[in-house]
Amino acid sequence: MALFGSGAEIKHLELEKHSLSVDVYHSNINAIDDTELLMFFEKNTSGSICAVYKFQGMGKDPPDREKWGKITFLSPDAAKRAVELDGDEFCGSNLKILPSQSAMGGDKTFLFPEVKARIFWPRRLSRGFGIVICDKIDVNIKHHRRRRPPPLPSNFNSDNQSHRRKLPRHQFPITKPLSRIPSVGPFKQHFLVESLRHRTTSSISDAGIIETLISDTSLPENVTVVGITIDSRNNRILAVIHAVKPLPPFNALAAYDLKSGNRLFLSPLPIDEEALANDVAVDYNGNAYVTNSIGNYIWKVNVKGEASIFSKSPRFTEHPVDRDTPYSYIGLNGIAYVSSEDYLLVVQSNTGKVFKVDADDGTAKHVLLNEDLTRPDGVVFRSDGVILVVSPQANKLWLLKSNNGWGEGVVYDKIDLESEGYPTSVVLRGRDKMYVLYGYFLEGLLGNSEREGFRIEEIMSPKESEGENVWLYVMIGFGMVYFVYWRFQMGS
């Protein structure tokens, strides 16, 4: 059973042995404040509650006298985390939390497999529904969105080999990091960029309208913001601050309120040697993870701004480095958090390696790829399990995927990028829109920090576009077969 909201967003999906609901038991249900209990689940599951059913006290059978009720979540991950709260203390007694038996036919011990769903948009204006083809034994979530292409803008590059659409060129001081505001107020789906020298954060709309969100003149002069991300759960912007030589050493993480722009904290990152704070990712609890490119380790900064060295795995330094190549001192660089499995994916520029890092204990494993990447920099994780990696030295955008939770992976598409502009960052919008920032960052490091102009381009994957056409033909074929069968039945 699937319940869709606007834009065919799945609001509720329930299949055999795949539940979104949990039953809640407590030895003294009369002592429970319902509001506090729901807030407890919201806080500890990082998921939205979509339905609550409270059992009535009259006429309960003895096994159900301690049953408070049933809670339904919007995602199976949230329901799984709720079950993990079984045994936690609440209002003087331990909670008993079980997967809802009504959704499972009485089976109390089951896993929470993911569901593989292919969603095809009708080739007409949406009427608020889609088509779902789903097998209960599938285990990977994949979304394929079909829609009528929008009219091409006047500045669209029609060269078939480029597969990119250029957004308006922005007049703005030189930048490196790029992020995207997912769903916050008037800046929903806007891009975020940081200035190389001006200690400002700005929002950019699709129309090219720039608005300064943050201007933090209390930061040391001439420091560089080298990485940013959005903590959407806590409505914060997280910015990695670094001072480039010959300035005095300075490495920190700053947090700003996304709506007001006020700084929440500025946390110096602890170092025991030379360091270069670079990129940042954030988990669902608000913990930030910052890469140290020179020291080859990862810092962790909790939601209160308390910083510590999180992972100094020997895996980060076991591969040889060619010290005669440019920027050979740049090690760990781009980092992304995978919320479904609670781990980090990190790229290493000077070796081209990718690492999977446990977000609980910091243990790292080398991800075996069919080819090494060349000077990888920015990285982002897509909802279908694909990771995107960009390189300003190789001028490439790689698309990688894995079938075993990133023990191994393959590069299945490589897209050539323009050499002018030094592409350093990549972000996503929805499932199928990829954007690369050409910030001319290298020019800024070489002294031209007042260049007026940078570019954000939408990049398209030719291989994924071919896949969309294949599915279109398959759906047309099914439609023709059904039509012929219907005509035959009518004739009979």
Image (spheres, helix red, strand yellow):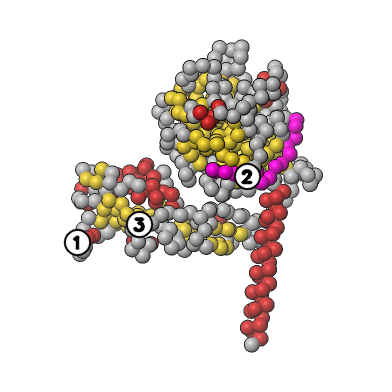
The residue under label 3 is: 109
Where residue 269 appears, x then y in whole percent? 48, 21
**Dividing the picture into quarters, in which one does residue 445 lie?**
top right
Most frequent secondary structure within the magenta stretch: strand
Which one is earlier in the sequence, the residue at label 2 or at label 1? 1
User: Is disc 1 placed on a helix, strand or loop?
Assistant: helix
Going by the picture, which residue comes out furthest to the right? 159
Magenta span contains residue 415: yes
User: Is disc 2 placed on a helix, strand or loop?
Assistant: strand
Left or right: residue 117 versus residue 108 is: right
Q: Nearer the viewer, mark 3 or mark 1?
A: 3
The residue under label 2 is: 410
Residue 210 visible to the viewer: no
Q: Is residue 172 above or below residue 189?
A: above
The residue under label 1 is: 62
- What range of the chain is rendered magenta? 406-420
> What's the residue at 53%, 48% (across, down)?
404
